[in-house]
């Protein structure tokens, strides 16, 4: 089922969202100072391409650096990437088949706004007792 949802996701919006994250990653990697933002953007591009079967969990040991990078991320890229998720979710929610995809887009909003201090892991590899923040 995850494979089918991932294929439908890829065709109806996932490719464009992943390209948006990849474009942000390339732009951030051009400047040396913003390379950490580029790395996070490429990580999010991978998640936006194939989200089903993966979960977002808190990263242990994330501290003040994550908070500072999250603020910089929101200012430079987070707001327009979140807007892309909202726009795509609205377009997908028009059809019955697109409703689960729209819900997945809305679940991706928090990590698109504040990606630092979180990690994306396969949902099958979560140890018992470790609860995902968002699971698709």
Image (tube, grey):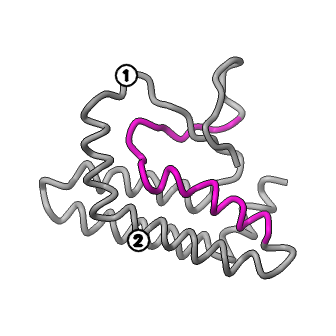
Frontmost residue, 108 versus 8: 108
Frontmost residue, 1 versus 100: 100
In this rendering, the answer to whether 35 lies above or below 66 is below
Q: In this figure, which residue is indicated by the disc labeled 1? A: 61
Seen at 72% across and 33% down, the residue is: 124
Seen at 55% across and 34% down, the residue is: 57
Whole-percent x, y for residue 122 in the image: 64, 38
Q: Mark 2 falls on what kind of element? A: helix
User: Magenta segment: does it hold 120?
Assistant: yes
Q: In this figure, which residue is indicated by the disc labeled 2? A: 80
Which badge, 2 or 1, is on the more N-terminal residue?
1
The answer to whether 96 appears left or right of 70 in the picture is: right
- Tally of numbered discs: 2
The answer to whether 88 appears left or right of 58 in the picture is: right
Highlighted magenta segment, given as a residue range: 99-123
**Residue 3 - label:** none
In this rendering, the answer to whether 9 lies above or below 1 is below
In this rendering, the answer to whether 115 lies above or below 38 is above
Mark 2 Cα-neighbour bin, 10 Å: few <14, some 14–19, many ≥20 = some
Report the quarter where the N terminus lies. bottom right
State how far apart marks 2 and 1 are (Cα): 28 Å
Whole-percent x, y for residue 98 in the image: 78, 73
Seen at 49% across and 72% down, the residue is: 83
Viewer-nearest of discs 2 and 1? 2
Whole-percent x, y for residue 59 in the image: 45, 29
Q: Mark 1 falls on what kind of element? A: loop
Whole-percent x, y for residue 26 in the image: 29, 67
């Amino acid at each position: 089922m995850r494979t089918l949802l991932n294929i439908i996701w890829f065709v109806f919006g996932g490719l464009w969202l992943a390209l948006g994250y990849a474009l942000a990653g390339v732009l951030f990697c051009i400047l040396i100072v913003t390379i950490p933002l580029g790395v996070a953007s490429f990580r999010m591009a991978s998640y936006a391409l194939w989200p089903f079967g993966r979960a977002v969990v808190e990263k242990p040991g994330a501290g003040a650096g994550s908070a500072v990078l999250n603020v910089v991320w929101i200012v430079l890229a987070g707001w327009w990437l979140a807007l892309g998720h909202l726009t795509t979710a609205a377009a997908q929610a028009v059809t019955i088949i697109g409703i689960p995809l729209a819900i997945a887009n809305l679940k991706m909003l928090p990590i698109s706004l504040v990606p630092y201090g979180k990690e994306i892991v396969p949902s099958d590899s979560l140890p018992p007792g470790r609860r995902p923040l968002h699971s698709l």
